[in-house]
Image (cartoon, helix red, strand yellow):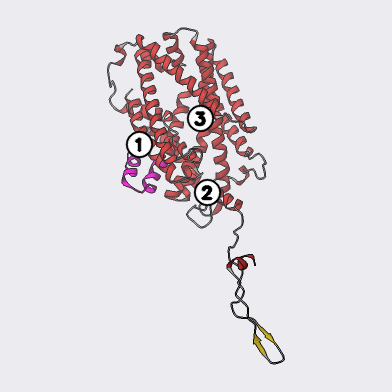
Amino acid sequence: MLAWAALVAASVPLAATFTALAVRHRQAGGIAGLAELAFGPRAFAVVGWCFYCAAPLAACAAALIGGQYAATALGAGRGVGLAVAGCILAVVFTANAFGLHTSGRLQLGLVGALLVLLTTAAVSAAPHVNLANFNPLLPAGPVPVGRAMAVLFIAFSGWEACGHLTDSVARPERTLPRVAAAAVAIVGVLYLSLATVTIGVLGPAAASAPAPFITLLHRGIGEAAGPAAAAVALLLTCGAGITFVAGAVRLGDALARRGALPALLTTPGDPAGRPRRNLLTLAGLTALAATGCLSADVGVGPLLRVLSVLLAAVTLAGTAAGIVLLPTWRRTAPAVIATAVTAVVLGAAGPLLVAPAVVGAGGVTFAVLRRGRPPSTSRSSTPPPLAAARWQRRPPHRSRRRRPLPSRKSPTRTTPVGVVKVAATTPSRRARSRQ
């Protein structure tokens, strides 16, 4: 509960930092582009590789979670859960292969259904809270709080998505801060309420329950709520997986075009705009991660820990970029606080810090060895790919230089007597404009 409360408090500077960056720096590179603006092109490769390698782990973890919820609701064993997880992965990659994405209204409906279920579970299970489950407060000292923050950080990542909303929101300088504040308040209340009820009702059993949310609904409402919660979990995991993989596919295409990934991963001339080579690569990496988890009998927990550390490293790069890019101290102060909190979370991860270190080093090494130099930075005179595409779509510049006006000198005429001047008036402005 202390870890949840600390991360809810840390969401305030995180949201303020990425909202300010989104309003001030409207560019399509996402958090990797912000890192490049602040620290140079090698930061683009490091952040891009961390997010790209996190995509297979996220897809695998989401599928396993959805499979566990479905198996728990049906009262089935692990085999059914793994089969459902495989179906979720198939839906995610098939939808991305055909360019199908969940619409905004559908996602809004799914999130609304989830909010209703969360509120119902918290309210209905509240009478079953046992205060004895909250003692002792810190049985092993404050160190486990930091470790819990390193695991739970995955639930608070994603504020960098504000940078993709500036082109779709009217008056983003006013709208985005209000939406971010409302999101922090809603998420904070729901997370803290659900964490309190989960610990108060389930106690230590919450750590071993495959689907604690369904267990809470069973305690509060009854057995009938389980299938509904499982259905919403399946829809949400599919929608989140589709969106996450779609972003990773496009990021991989950008990395390949910039020299941070093999050039074979680009898909030139695809009329539908779908980088299918990157999609196949991510599908293979996801299958490899799933096979490794099954062969080593690794559950969702280790996947979520590694994924959380990778996303925390990406977030740290974004908040550190905010310290460099934001102009005034009022806007820089939240970035400093967010950077400090994220650094503490990463420090609490311990040996798992090897994951972002190895991935980032691999990205920089590949970019340097492939091109002999880092990819071209956006600070140079060459525009980035998106800006270059927009520049090419502009109509050619038409010169507004006026045609030369007729001479104001009086015309002359040759006669037998000699050259004489002909009385002629200078054309008016309207006549000159017609000429």
Q: If you read the primary sequence from the N terminus, does the residue marked by circle 3 or circle 1 appear first?
A: 1
Q: Residue furthest right?
A: 416
Eyeballing the image, is 87 above or below 424?
above
Q: Main secondary structure of the magenta part?
A: helix
Query: Could you tell me if residue 295 is visible in this image?
Result: no
What residue is shown with label 3?
Answer: 58
What residue is at 58 percent from the left and 29 percent from the top?
Answer: 287
Amino acid carrying label 1: it is: Pro
What residue is at 56 percent from the left and 22 percent from the top?
Answer: 85
Q: Find residue 313 and report its horizontal and vertical position in percent.
A: 42, 38
Amino acid carrying label 3: it is: Ala
Q: Find residue 188 and report its horizontal and vertical position in percent.
A: 37, 26
Q: Find residue 383 and report its horizontal and vertical position in percent.
A: 53, 53
Q: Quadrant of the C terminus?
A: bottom right
Q: Quadrant of residue 316?
A: top left
Eyeballing the image, is 102 above or below 160?
above
Label 2, label 3: how many angstroms apart (C-alpha)?
A: 25 Å
- Tell me which segment is drawn in magenta: 318-339
10 Å neighbourhood of mark 1: few (<14), some, or many (≥20)? many
Q: Nearer the viewer, mark 2 or mark 3?
A: 3
Q: Nearer the viewer, mark 2 or mark 1?
A: 1
Number of marks drawn: 3
Front position in the image: 290 or 29: 29
What residue is shown with label 1?
Answer: 13
Q: Which mark is residue 367?
A: 2
Q: Is residue 131 magenta?
A: no
Q: If you read the primary sequence from the N terminus, does the residue marked by circle 2 or circle 3 appear first?
A: 3
Label 1 sits on a secondary structure element that is helix
Q: Quadrant of the N terminus?
A: top left
Amino acid carrying label 2: it is: Ala
